[in-house]
Image (cartoon, grey):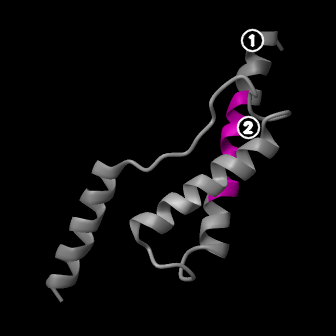
C-alpha cells in the first residue's frame, strides 16, 4: 500500500477514535449530570481541549496544531428551536 494511503487511513482512524471518545464521555459522564446550559457546555469543551487533546497530542494529534473543540452556536440554536417546537405540539 502506498505511503499516502497509509497516512490517510491513520488520519481517518484518529478522527473516528477521538469522535467516539468524546461522544462516549459526554453520554456517560456529562449528559444528565450537568445542566445543559452555555457555561457547562463551555466547561466540557474546555476539559476536552485542555486534558484530552493534550494526552492525544503525541500520538494521535499533531502537537504543532492548535487542537480545540468548539460549539456551533447557530446549529445549537436550530436544534433548541426544533426541540421547543416539538414539545409544543404534544
Q: State the residue at coordinates (77%, 29%).
A: 10
Classify residue 90 by image quadrant.
bottom left
Tell me, yes or no, whether the two marked residues, 1 and 2, touch with CB atoms within 8 Å: no
For marks 1 and 2 on the same chain, the one whose residue lies earlier in the sequence: 1
Mark 2 closeness class: few <14, some 14–19, many ≥20 residues within 10 Å: few
Q: Which mark is residue 13?
A: 2
Q: Secondary structure at mark 1?
A: helix
Q: Is residue 81 above or below residue 19?
A: below
Residue 65, given in percent of the width and then of the height, sits at 66, 25
> In this picture, which residue range is highlighted in magenta?
11-22
Q: Is residue 73 above or below residue 89?
A: above
Q: Which mark is residue 4?
A: 1
Q: Secondary structure at mark 2?
A: helix
Q: Which mark is residue 86?
A: none
Residue at the bottom extreme? Answer: 90
Mark 1 closeness class: few <14, some 14–19, many ≥20 residues within 10 Å: few
Magenta region, main secondary structure = helix
Residue 61 visible within the image: yes
Q: Is residue 18 magenta?
A: yes
Residue 3, given in percent of the width and then of the height, sits at 81, 11
Residue 49, given in percent of the width and then of the height, sits at 64, 47
Classify residue 36 by image quadrant.
bottom left
Q: State the residue at coordinates (66%, 74%).
A: 29
Residue 17 visible within the image: no
Q: Is residue 52 above or below residue 44?
A: above
Viewer-proximal residue among 71 and 39:
39
Q: State the residue at coordinates (85%, 33%).
A: 58
Amino acid at each position: 500500500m502506498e505511503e499516502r494511503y497509509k497516512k490517510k487511513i491513520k488520519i481517518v482512524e484518529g478522527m473516528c477514535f477521538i469522535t467516539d471518545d468524546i461522544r462516549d464521555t459526554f453520554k456517560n459522564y456529562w449528559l444528565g449530570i450537568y445542566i445543559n446550559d452555555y457555561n457547562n457546555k463551555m466547561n466540557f469543551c474546555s476539559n476536552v481541549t485542555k486534558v484530552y487533546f493534550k494526552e492525544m497530542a503525541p500520538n494521535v494529534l499533531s502537537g504543532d496544531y492548535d487542537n480545540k473543540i468548539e460549539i456551533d452556536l447557530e446549529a445549537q440554536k436550530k436544534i433548541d428551536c426544533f426541540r421547543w417546537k416539538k414539545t409544543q405540539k404534544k
